[in-house]
Amino acid sequence: MALVEPFFEADIKAAVVKAIGGNEAKAIIEKDEWLGSLPGFIVRCFGVFFNGVCGSVAIYSSEYGEN
């Protein structure tokens, strides 16, 4: 994937971080994350948006075990 051109302009200077729902984060994590899993208990989810397109997510949890 690193060799593929992004399908949107990913200028970090114009990026916007905002809270997103668990279902939106789950869809991105299960598709793009190499582990393909989420924690059992999610505290908060945030998305990094480039021109309205979510390019990455961060999920915060108090659980560290596998799910």
Image (cartoon, rainbow, N blue to C red):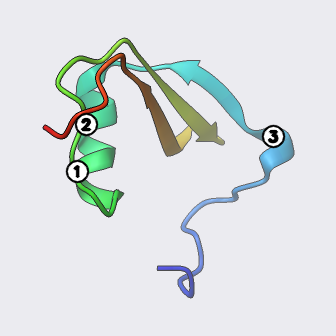
Image position, residue 14 (x, y; %): 81, 40
Q: Secondary structure at mark 1?
A: helix
Q: Residue furthest front?
A: 65
Name the mark on residue 30.
1
51 vs 62, left or right, is right
49 vs 11, left or right, is left
Q: Which residue is mark 2?
A: 26
Foreground of the two, 5 or 28: 28
- Nearest to N terminus: mark 1 or mark 3: 3
2 or 3: mark nearer the eye: 2
Name the mark on residue 51.
none
Give me the residue at 69% from left, 59% from top: 9
Asked which quadrant contains residue 32, the reply is bottom left
Asked which quadrant contains residue 45, the reply is top left
Q: Quadrant of the C terminus?
A: top left
Q: Residue furthest bottom?
A: 3
Name the mark on residue 14.
3
Q: Residue furthest top?
A: 43
Q: Secondary structure at mark 3?
A: helix
Q: Residue furthest right?
A: 13
The amino acid at mark 1 is Glu
Image position, residue 29 (x, y; %): 31, 47
Q: Are marks 2 and 1 in contact (CB under 8 Å)?
A: yes
Q: Is 21 situated above or below 28?
A: above
